[in-house]
């Protein structure tokens, strides 16, 4: 479900589109839209709206807020193409955006954040050059995490899940360093899905159960949903309450397939590097406004 504008916003949009059909209005509007004045006004309005949304969320009953937010960070490449950038610049912008989103989530005291950073499918489909650049970004990002004051001041434990055996050695070393430097923390849990696939995760869980069954340590009749959940990569985490996907796609792309059975979804058209504090607040406000129904 997308964020819906009120009647005033819809009326304003229709009026603007009608006026822009006239050349007399279109020329000065184009100049104004690209002027420093417009950017100044828009940025100030966004800042005010963000502060108001933040205030509304902080005044909510804490139990109404999501405890676990998961994000499919989509759109780095499209952001780069739209802005005439190199693909690597788009991915780099996405990495920097994640640092900001982490700060916003911590500010709201939401204890669990999980992000989809790299799927098994993308590892196979992307070019060797692009993957090499991505791996360098992961190494850089994980090293920054291991020494980031924001992480240590907020006692954030970093957790990386997926089939690590398919990752380069330098990425695996950076993962171990980030995890080891935060292993004693438990106030917030930041989970990064790397070389990850939801189906593969379920397969690995089933294999684990099959091995125990073959050894005689469990009975087939004892296998239930809780037992499968306990064998997943994310077994120590609660299931996501809210899943956000950027860049306009409305699908889950093999992400946390077991865990999102009862999650609420929020899709936004903005590319991940353009995802703003206001976009996050809109997603959470939309979640708060819903009446969650489990199993119906």
Image (cartoon, rainbow, N blue to C red):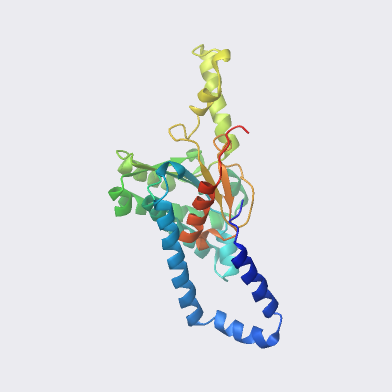
Is residue 193 visible in the rendered structure shown here? no
Locate the C terminus and report the quarter of the image it occupies: top right
State the residue in front, 12 or 229.
Answer: 12
Identify the image quadrant of residue 176. top left
Residue found 53% across the figure and 21% down from its top? 209
In the figure, is residue 196 to the left or right of 151?
right
Q: Residue at x 60, y 86 (%)?
A: 28
Q: How many tags in the picture?
A: 0
Image location of residue 88, percent across then percent down: 51, 62
Residue 70 visible, this angle: yes
Depth check: give the residue in front, 207 or 276.
276
| Residue located at (66% from left, 74% from top) | 15
Where is residue 39? Give x, y as percent.
Answer: 49, 76
At x 40% / y 57%, what residue is drawn?
55
**Which residue, as the protein is rendered here, is positioned at the far bottom?**
24
Image position, residue 194 (x, y; %)? 50, 45
Q: Is residue 97 left or right of residue 130?
A: left
Looking at this view, is 7 or 136 the one in front?
A: 7
Residue found farthest to the front: 7
Front-lying residue, 16 or 279: 16
């Amino acid at each position: 479900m997308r964020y819906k504008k009120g009647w005033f916003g819809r009326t304003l949009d229709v009026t603007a589109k009608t006026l822009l059909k006239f050349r007399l209005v279109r020329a000065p509007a184009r100049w104004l839209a690209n002027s420093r004045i417009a950017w100044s006004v828009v940025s100030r309005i966004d800042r005010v709206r963000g502060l108001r949304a933040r205030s509304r969320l902080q005044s909510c009953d804490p139990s109404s807020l999501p405890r676990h937010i998961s994000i499919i960070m989509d759109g780095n490449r499209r952001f780069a193409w739209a802005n005439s950038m190199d693909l690597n610049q788009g991915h780099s912008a996405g990495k920097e955006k994640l640092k900001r989103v982490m700060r916003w989530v911590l500010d709201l005291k939401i204890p669990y954040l999980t992000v989809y950073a790299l799927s098994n499918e993308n590892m196979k489909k992307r070019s060797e050059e692009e993957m090499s650049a991505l791996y360098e970004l992961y190494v850089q990002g994980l090293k920054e995490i291991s020494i980031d004051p924001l992480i240590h001041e907020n006692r954030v434990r970093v957790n990386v899940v997926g089939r690590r055996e398919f990752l380069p050695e330098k990425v695996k070393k950076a993962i171990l360093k980030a995890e080891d430097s935060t292993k004693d923390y438990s106030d917030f849990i930041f989970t990064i899905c790397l070389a990850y696939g939801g189906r593969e995760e379920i397969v690995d869980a089933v294999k684990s159960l099959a091995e125990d069954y073959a050894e005689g340590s469990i009975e087939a009749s004892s296998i239930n949903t809780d037992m499968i959940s306990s064998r997943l990569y994310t077994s120590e985490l609660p299931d996501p309450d809210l899943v956000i996907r950027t860049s306009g796609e409305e699908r889950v792309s093999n992400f946390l397939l077991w865990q999102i059975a009862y999650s609420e979804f929020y899709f936004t058209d903005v590319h991940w590097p353009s995802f703003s504090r206001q976009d996050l607040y809109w997603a959470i406000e939309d979640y708060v406004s819903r009446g969650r129904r489990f199993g119906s």
